[in-house]
Amino acid sequence: MSKRTTIFKILIFGSFIIGAVLIGILTFLYPTIPTKWNGDPYVVELVDLQNQAELLENELIVITGGFNDYNYDQSIDVLTIDLRDDLRDINIQLKFFNWSNHDKYNSFEIRKGVSYSVKGVSLINSKGYVLGLDIVQINSSITNILSLIGLGVLIPFIFLYFRIDIKKAKLIRRSGKKSKGGIINA
């Protein structure tokens, strides 16, 4: 391999890395505006709820993530869930009124550190919270188990077609029977 092709490969890789970092920084500084298709709810993040509160007011939204804290007040039958983004210093509350009458009340246990998807109505401007309508736990343990099974299948397939050259620290393609070329006389 010549020096010219090596430099060309390094430039391509470097431009890819710089572009990815630049896109990440721009997405962090200027987040996208939530959009809605065919009457579906807005799929939002916490930063969207804070920055686009006027657009999302009284609109159906879906937010996915982990809960930082929750509180159930039996006297007024309200479940309050705190969503927090410490990096951007955002704190938003989800409130489920009449939680004991909700269809998930008896079959649902809320735990910290587990991912949930919540559908609700954004009332950030008018009342300062999101009115919760439905909540679903995202079972990530099944996804992790299936990923490990897939990894257990993928690794043997890789070593079926490649071998490791320890001295050069790289994968080398296994060669099958070498062809001698030409026409085979039968």
Image: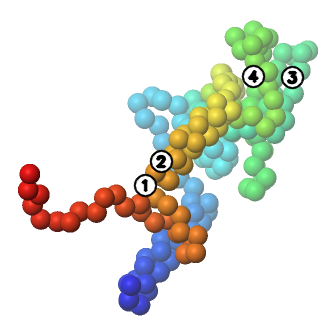
At mark 2, the secondary structure is helix
Confirm or deny contact between disc 1 and disc 2 (CB under 8 A): yes
Q: Hey, what amino acid is under mark 1?
A: Tyr
**First in sequence: mark 4 vs mark 2:** 4
Q: Looking at the picture, does residue 181 appear above or below residue 105? A: below
Q: What distance separates the C-alpha of mark 3 from that of mark 2?
A: 51 Å
Confirm or deny contact between disc 3 and disc 2 (CB under 8 A): no
Q: What distance separates the C-alpha of mark 1 from that of mark 2?
A: 7 Å
Question: According to the image, label 3 marks what residue?
Answer: 72
Q: What distance separates the C-alpha of mark 4 from that of mark 2?
A: 49 Å
The label number, if any, that marks residue 96 in the structure image: 4
Residue drawn at the location 47% of the way across and 47% of the way down: 157
Q: Looking at the picture, does residue 29 appear above or below residue 120? A: below
At mark 4, the secondary structure is strand
**First in sequence: mark 3 vs mark 2:** 3
Q: What distance separates the C-alpha of mark 3 from that of mark 4?
A: 9 Å
Q: Nearer the viewer, residue 156 or 61?
A: 156
